[in-house]
Amino acid sequence: MSGRTRLALCAFVATMLAAGALLPLVETSKWVLQAGFLLGVQTCVGALARRMRLARILTVSLQVLVTLLTLTMAFAREHALFGVLPGPQAVQRLADLLTAGADDVNRYAIPAPATDGIRLMLIGGVLLIGLAVDLLAVTFRTAAPAGLPLLALYSVAAGLSEGGAGWIWFTLAACGYLLLLLAEGRERLSQWGRVFGGVSRTSNSLAAGLDGSSGRPLAPVRTGRRIGAVALGVALAVPAALPALDGGLLGGTGGGTGRGGGGGTISAVNPLVSLQNNLNQAENREVMTYRTNSASPQDFYLRILALDQFSGGEWRPSTRRLSDVPDRLPQPTGLGTDVSVTEIRTNISASRSYQQTYLPLPYPASEVNVQGRWRYEPEGRTLVGDDGQTTGGARYEVSSLVVEPTASQLGEARAARSELVREYTRLPASLPDVVEDTAEQVTEGAANDYERAVKLQDWFASEGGFRYDTTVTSGTGTAAIERFLKDKEGFCVHFSSTMAAMARALGIPARVAVGFTPGTAQADGSVSVGLRDAHAWPELYFEGVGWTRFEPTPSRGSAPSYTRPDAPSQDPSDPALPTDDASVAPTAAPSATESCPVQERRQGQCGAATVPGAVDSSDPGTPAGVVALWVLGSLVVLALPLLPMLWRLRVRRRRLGAFGGTDPTDDAIGGAAGTGGGPDGAAPSTARGGRRGSSGRTAADATVRVMTAWRELTDTAWDHGIVPDESQTPRKAAARVVRLGGLDGAAASAAHRLAGAVEQVLYAPAPRVAGGSAQDVREVREGLWAAAGRWGRVRATLAPRSAVRVIWAMSEARAELGRRWSERLGRDRWAARLRRVSRQEG
């Protein structure tokens, strides 16, 4: 096995070991077998291309082409042209699968089911990383940078699994990388010849050490193994020994927890990532139940935490100082004494399967009675589990305040403190101008911040034409906000984060709260809260009232009474409790065909008109012109690697007379200088001068035929690895072809006979040339073909070396064009100067 083939095999193994970190992400591991097979095909194609000594760009292009074809066969065979070529329908199918895969990633919790979309993302990602590793380590022979794509593959797995990709997968990925480095080191050392591997204690120890046959690994290899083992051990042992390093790629919670009296900080993971998964669960699994004496159950939101930092990429919570939980929580920030406040009590029981670091509480809580290790974060008024404490199976009692401001109190709120405004109105420089422009346009005519906030809420909830859809790609960054304002479809994460950003753009302190809507009332008087009740809403700050909830998301939760000053009071007999229908299907769809979510349309749950495979009779289908262009483009892509072979076949046929009647002298690329290549007995009889030979042709015709045949013999030998040597005489050149090509018998005689004919037409005053030059070339070609090995034949056929004459001819033509253009410009410049001189003299 050659060094490069061994290196390619190690690159394959390293990629598959790193891909093992993706196994915890899905329920089944069958996809990795398919990924390994397709990656093996990609690796073999690269090895074959390098064996034929193709250019690097051709090698990579072949691998990319084969990867695309194999993915098409695996995932879109029924939509592909001839089952292989990726036509427009196949490309659309792959795009649909990628979109579905992104939706499934956001929808399902880990481990997710291996849907077609998720499998395409996993297998495509492994193939992409494998191509990058093969390109760096094998094609360009730089194995060290190949660790970056391997690290990226492991990092994605570790990030998505939130620590599920543990030290075992890290060890396997690291071993694969070290194996790749070891193979690359061996391959480099082998290029320097035999390496001294140390003196053996046996006889002939010096000789054994020189050729490395002493039975022990080479000294540089042993040193590399030791360094790799030590580095891997340090990478695994140090994070385990230092508690400060328990986060990161090898797992951990990602944030510290405080201990003792009043110490410690918390840096939480963004909960918006899992919120969409909860909303799209197939079953509305219960996470908690509660009983409360609240007179307004429709406003009873259970709040987990607040996201108060907007970096431009996402909303996330700040790193805050923690303290012990006080017996009674302090007065809420900004709440004045003139605002109506009622204290209520609630008993909450969390499911054992619901394990959350933050304790869900009604806002603002005033007293919490809970068992376990909990810490208090004053700014967000949240309780955080310490030392692994979660909500699983927790039972606790909460006293909270129901703050009931009036519209006039909110409208007359005085300006907030400058430090609070500065912190909670901070916006990234990347925020698009459309956010602030839209906010100003929507709130035009508002007299104060309260009216602006109400206008924003009503615009999102009812007046702006927005549609609630949980299948839209999640995101809270500036790009997601801009896309949401354009498409006007999304779910609570989009509505809350966008309204908070627009409020900040108007100078109103704002943040995003995450928690649960009130839930569904049960027959026994309790209220059940399920995964689909997960929700996000904006909180805006008004001095004298404090942080105030708003509800911009349509068909979710309830708008607070203080945002509806003119709304009639509700019928006491008809309490505004959320219904099970609202929780299960929160979107109000006017028709099944117009607003059915994409996920349900794919599953065929939107009526007969949207069942997969149904086609509207008015759909004209894909235009024939588009199909023709895709077919033509696919054929061109497939034909590109075959261009050298096709050109070589064309030249050989013209030279040997495969096309009767073709003028052989018109071979500007492959023919001899000043001559073409003609078939024996087919050259025209109108050549200039010369006397006719025995065949009835002139001497010039014979010269053309012989020189064309000699050039074809030279190029055929070149295709089989015998580089032309123009400094030798024809006789010595033929002897060299016979010797290097292993020719004998008729093939050797044909080569010598053709060389003698060349000497006749070049040096004899009266050339005597017999016919049969084309037959001599064919015999030499058959001899070279028989003597060449299997790979030599493939190399000579698919990638003939003599095809480089095309590049030479193009280079010469470009140089000649440049020379002529320069001469023309020079003449024009001198002519212009003469005209100026003549005018001056005149």
Image (spheres, rainbow, N blue to C red):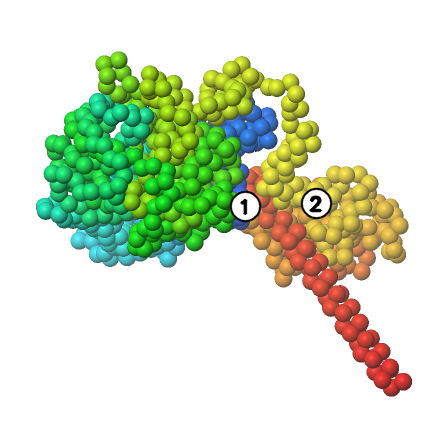
Between marks 1 and 2 in the image, the one whose residue lies nearer the viewer: 1
The answer to whether any part of residue 159 appears in the image is no
Q: Nearer the viewer, residue 612 or 663?
A: 612
The residue at the point 78 percent across, 74 percent down is: 829
Identify the residue at image location x=77%, y=43%: 679
Q: On the image, numbered disc 1 is attached to which residue?
A: 58
Which quadrant is home to the C terminus? bottom right
Foreground residue among 284 and 717: 284
**Height in image: 827 above or below 454?**
below
Which of the 4 quarters of the picture holds residue 21?
top left
Position of residue 501 measured from the top left corner of the image (x, y, whole percent): 41, 45
Measured from the top left, where is residue 272 in percent x and y? 34, 37
User: How dense is the environment of label 1, judged by Cα within 10 Å: few (below 14), some, or many (20 and up)?
Assistant: some
**Mark 2 Cα shell of 10 Å, populated few (<14), some (14-19), many (≥20):** many
Q: Residue 327 is drawn in which quadrant? A: top left
Q: Which callout, 1 or 2, points at the residue further toward the start of the chain?
A: 1
Q: In the figure, is residue 23 to the left or right of 757?
A: left
Amino acid tagged 1: Leu
| 224 or 584: nearer the viewer | 584
Q: Which residue: 50% across, 35% down?
A: 464
Which circle marks residue 651 in the picture? 2
